[in-house]
Amino acid sequence: DREAEIAALETPGQGAPRAQHVLVRHATVGQALHRATELPVNFFDRLEELVAAMHARGICHNDLHKEQNVLVDEQGYPGLIDFQLASVHAGDSRAFRVRCHEDLRHIQKHRRRYLRDGRGPEGVLVEDSIRAGAGAGLKRRPLSLVWRRTGKPLYHFITRRILRRWDGEERRESSGPWPAWTAALPPWPDSKRDCLG
């Protein structure tokens, strides 16, 4: 199973699994981003650090467009779940760069959504925060645009109208409620630093 393979890699993209045919499940305590009632003002910066550490190990998540795949733990630090679509890459291939781009673009999309229209913390210039992120200025790739304008509407028509199924992608309603903003998170504590490499 793909998740077991990714979880078992000691040095993704280069290497030998630590253990074969073993899936280590780790319970992460927290709530999905769309259900969080509070967020630290630098939450999205910490999320970008987490994703950058994952990319440094040659792993792309490939499913960060879903708010429910981003967790907020008890201290307010970000976490990631659902690595079902994740990919492991050796070296700096074009496919790896494209997938990294998409991971960062989705974080930037969440940042924009949570900070715009007066939803962001007081005293934080929203445009500066959006421009400062690692995904700042990233645009959809042409193939992604084609999918969004042609494939996705067709997919929704077939799944929702014909098959009467929804994909279960939960997200925060545009009308809110939006999270309250709390003090900035300190640097990653030692107990969490392992996930950053």
Image (cartoon, rainbow, N blue to C red):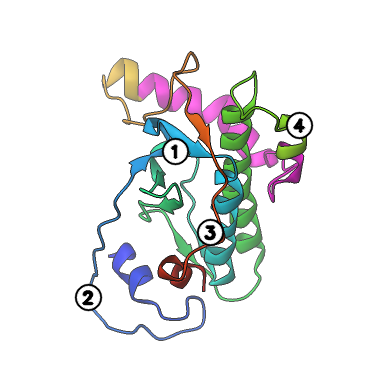
Region of the chain picked out in magenta, as a range = 130-158
Task: Give residue 4's quadrant in the image.
Answer: bottom left
Judged from this view, the residue extending furthest toward the front is 183
Residue beneath the point at 63% across and 44% down: 105
**At which x and y percent is residue 37?**
40, 30
Give the crowd class for mark 4: few <14, some 14-19, many >=20 residues within 10 Å: few
Return the residue at label 1.
66
Q: Earlier in the sequence, mark 4 or mark 2?
A: 2
Q: Is residue 124 left or right of residue 32?
A: right
* Mark 2 vs mark 1, CA separation in Å: 27 Å
Residue at image mark 3: 50
Pinpoint residue 122: horizontal percent, then vertical percent.
65, 27
Which of pointers 1 and 3 indicates the residue nearer the eye? 3
Q: Earlier in the sequence, mark 1 or mark 4?
A: 1
Report the disc number at residue 127.
4
Residue corresponding to mark 2: 22
Helix, strand or loop for disc 1: loop
- Tell me how far mark 1 sits from mark 4, CA to CA: 23 Å
Q: Are marks 4 and 2 in contact (CB under 8 Å)?
A: no
Distance in Å between CA atoms under marks 4 and 2:
45 Å
As measured in the structure, the alpha-carbon distance from the residue carrying label 2 to the one carrying label 3 is: 24 Å
